[in-house]
Amino acid sequence: GPAHGRHCHRQQEREQGSGSGSGSGSARPQPPEPSLLRFLVCPLSKRPLRYEEATNELINEELGIAYPIIDGIPNMVPEAARMTHKKAPAEGSEQP
C-alpha cells in the first residue's frame, strides 16, 4: 500500500527531471505525434520523412538531411536541417 504510493511519487519527481539522469541536463526527447508523422513530408523533396528515435530527428535519406524535433514539434525549416551524410562523397562523383 504505502510503499507503492511512495514509489509513484518518486517516479513523478524523476519525470520532471533535475537533469541527474541525462548528461545533457535536458528532459527526455519527446517524439512527435504518430498522426503527425503520417502526413509530414520534406518541404524540399516532398518525400516522406523517417523518424530517428536515437537523435529525435526526422531524416530525409534521399537528401541526407535531418530536421530537429523540438518538444514534439518538427522544425521543418531548411535552415534548421543538418546534413546526415557520415562521409562526404568523393570529389567529382556527384553530378552537378
Image (cartoon, rainbow, N blue to C red):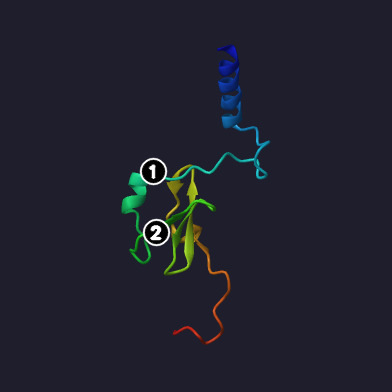
Q: Residue at x 54, y 79 (%)?
A: 89
Q: Residue at x 33, y 63 (%)?
A: 46
Which amino acid type corresponds to the residue marked 1 in the rendered image?
A: Glu
Q: Which one is in front, 95 or 10? A: 10
Q: Which sits earlier in the primary sequence, circle 1 or circle 2?
A: 1
Q: Residue at x 54, y 52 (%)?
A: 54
Farthest top residue in view: 2
Marks 1/2: CA–CA distance: 14 Å
Quarter of the picture containing the N terminus is top right
Which amino acid type corresponds to the residue marked 2 in the rendered image?
A: Leu
SS at badge 1: loop
Left or right for 38, reference 69? left
- Which residue is identified by label 2? 49
Judge whether 3 appears above or below 92 on screen.
Answer: above
Q: Where residue 25 sits in the image (x, y, percent)?
A: 65, 40
Q: Where residue 21 sits in the image (x, y, percent)?
A: 66, 38
Q: Residue at x 42, y 69 (%)?
A: 62
Total tally of numbered discs in the picture = 2
Q: Which one is in front, 75 or 63? A: 63
- Which residue is identified by label 1? 33
